[in-house]
Amino acid sequence: MPAPSRPAINDLIAERILVLEGAMGTMIQAEKLDEAGYRGERFADHGSDLRGNNDLLNLTQPELIQKIHEIYMSVGADIIETNTFNGTSISQADYQCEPFVHDINLAGAQIARRAADLWTEKTPDKPRYVFGNLGPTNRTCSISPDVNRPGYRAVSFDEMRETYLEQARALHEGGVDGFSVETVFDTLNCKAALFALEELFEEVGERLPVIVSGTVTDLTGRNLSGQTVTAFWYATRHSNPLAFGLNCGFGGEELRPFVEELANTIEVPLVCYPNAGLPNELGGYDESPAMTAGLIREWAENGWVNIVGGCCGTTPDHIKAIAEAVEGMTPRKAQSDRPRLRLAGLEPFETAA
């Protein structure tokens, strides 16, 4: 069956604030799957523990993953991301699942595609879009994991680029509408992902929209590789993303000053999907849907955002509240792109126009 027709997301983002689905991991954890639940029949004899490998559920529990996507769309999500946050061979090495990376990502894209097309047919006035999730991996190109060897790197740029390209090819094969390079803690990792996507676009002869979203690791607003949010933007703006912004790390209250900073800086639409507050002493999240939605509504009232949603700890109730909070509100107008030299170290630098 052909996919239902939809307007280009580049056009829709200028018309209204779009809503991104909430945390996939939170929903999977609520299922309390045991080791057998992760293994399924295909991996019954796999040689390492698989519990916690959420991406593998694309192969062993596809109905569950589709159900979660559909729940989020039923409460107002316009955009869903594939269940492939740890879908690179680098990340899957923790479970000795590198040989299955193509299948994991292909299935993740196909599951999300089916769910999105189903809901687009149900609500043609509210089309749904699938973005292939490229997570940060569990390694960093910029920082040594060994304090005694500061020049050492556990992974090279080319190795990172190759693992992202492998993932992106499978996601494209599965029918995604775009890609989300998200939860970026290391700018060089992000650049490897963006380089890989450029290679993919050249291979397939088409460009798909890309969302870039970083995460700050402390309240000074820097990522793990030390850049401020504006410096991170300057370092990646050459990729001309569909949207740029922040996710994870903190809740909306803590991210507010950095959202405002980006809203006054970037020349593209702004995306932000915070956690449900800060984790408690048990690692859970206590911020209510009303609290999260209230914070995001203020951003919308200030004209700061174009895409909003939720990250760690958020649930369908959070996404429902967020969707209701921003319904009918005017999306942010991007800053004009006045010509000037922009440089990015740990701090941003620019010349006067």
Image: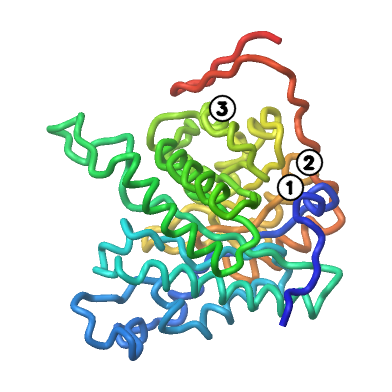
What is the crowding at mark 2: few (fewer than 14 residues within 10 Å), some, or many (at least 20)? many
Q: Amino acid at mark 3?
A: Tyr
Of circles 2 and 3, the one toward us is 3
220 left or right of 99?
A: right
Camera-nearest residue between 43 and 145: 43
Residue type for callout 2: Arg
Q: Does the residue at mark 2 contact the one at mark 1 (Cβ under 8 Å)? A: yes
SS state under label 3: helix
Query: Could you tell which of marks 2 and 1 lies nearer the N-terminus?
Result: 1
Q: Residue at x 31, y 76 (%)?
A: 51
CA gap, disc 3 to disc 1?
A: 20 Å
* Residue that carries the numbered disc 2 in the rendered image: 332
Q: Quadrant of the N terminus?
A: bottom right
Quick one: label 2 or label 3, which is nearer the N terminus? 3
Image quadrant occupied by the C terminus? top right
Location of residue 278 with respect to 219 vertically, above or below: below
Residue 306 numbered mark, or none:
1
Residue 169: percent from the left, percent from the top? 49, 60
Q: Give how far apart the Cα atoms at labels 2 and 3 are.
A: 20 Å
Mark 3 sits on what residue? Answer: 234
Residue 262 to residue 33: above or below: above
Where residue 259 sits: x, y (%)? 63, 38
